[in-house]
Image: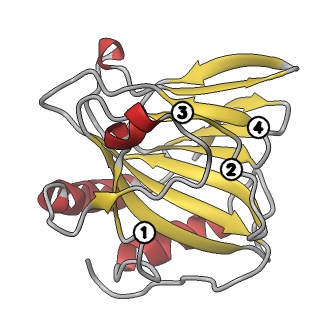
Amino acid sequence: MNLAFNFHDKLFWIHNFLPEHEYKRMYKNVIKIRNSKGMNKTKITWKKFKEEEEDNSYSFGQNENGIDSKFFFIFHTLLKYNSFIDFKKMNFHSHIRKFEYGNHLGWHNDSNDEGRKYAVTYYFNKTWHESWGGEFMFKSNLGSGFIPIKGNSVVIVESGLKHKVNSNLKKTHPRLSIQTWVSDKGDNNEINTEL
């Protein structure tokens, strides 16, 4: 696990987040379920234009209390004890997210009344060409930039930092990720069974 980028302690991009064998195992499992009928339109709580309704990403497990998976137990443990942000007393809620061709998320800052402190995005895709879109964009009065998609990397964003996800421009490759909300209250979804 190594820090590739830090934006004023408001955004962290960490490479090689999972041990390689764990990344490969979960990647195979996510590829198997990527066309699951359990995928639903992602719930969006911020204001959006009507024409954006059909361009939202899909989620697996967002409407549940989590997903039964040994992987999520390992993932949450690594998040909790990462070297860059103290998450030891935080709670996590994770789901799998899929951006098909044309799917995107508009500008938002993840602030809400649920005690949410950070948003974490974990990238699955081993192969992703820079012309395929799907980048994570961010901006503030301190500057702006983007994070490209890199498999087995994680982006941790403090609530309040404006960000968005550009449209997926590749018809044959969905952008696959785990979305995790980190909060200081609520249920901690520590999950410990196989996917």
> Label 1 belongs to which residue?
62
User: Tag 1's secondary structure?
Assistant: loop
Q: Are marks 1 and 2 in contact (CB under 8 Å)?
A: no
Residue 30 in picture, x, y percent from top left: 23, 58
Measured in 3D between alpha carbons, the distance from the residue under mark 3 to the one under mark 4, in whole angstroms, is 13 Å
Measured in 3D between alpha carbons, the distance from the residue under mark 4 to the one under mark 1, in whole angstroms, is 22 Å
Residue type for callout 4: Leu
Q: Quadrant of residue 11?
A: top right
What residue is shown at x 45% (from left), y 25% (from top)? 166
User: Tag 2's secondary structure?
Assistant: loop
User: Tag 3's secondary structure?
Assistant: strand
The image's mark for residue 110 is 2
Q: Residue furthest front?
A: 50
Residue 97 in picture, x, y percent from top left: 37, 53
> How would you rate the neighbour count of disc 3 (Cα within 10 Å): few for under 14, some for 14-19, many for 20 or more?
many
Q: Quadrant of residue 88?
A: bottom right
User: Tag 4's secondary structure?
Assistant: loop
What residue is shown at x 71% (from left), y 34% (from top)? 162
N-terminal of the two: label 4 or label 2? 2
Q: Quadrant of residue 117?
A: bottom right
Q: Is residue 56 left or right of residue 76?
A: left
N-terminal of the two: label 4 or label 1? 1
Measured in 3D between alpha carbons, the distance from the residue under mark 1 to the one under mark 3, in whole angstroms, is 19 Å
Front in this rendered view, residue 49 or 79? 49
What residue is shown at x 75% (from left), y 66% (from top)? 87
> Label 4 belongs to which residue?
161
> How would you rate the neighbour count of disc 2 (Cα within 10 Å): few for under 14, some for 14-19, many for 20 or more?
many
Front in this rendered view, residue 113 or 161? 113
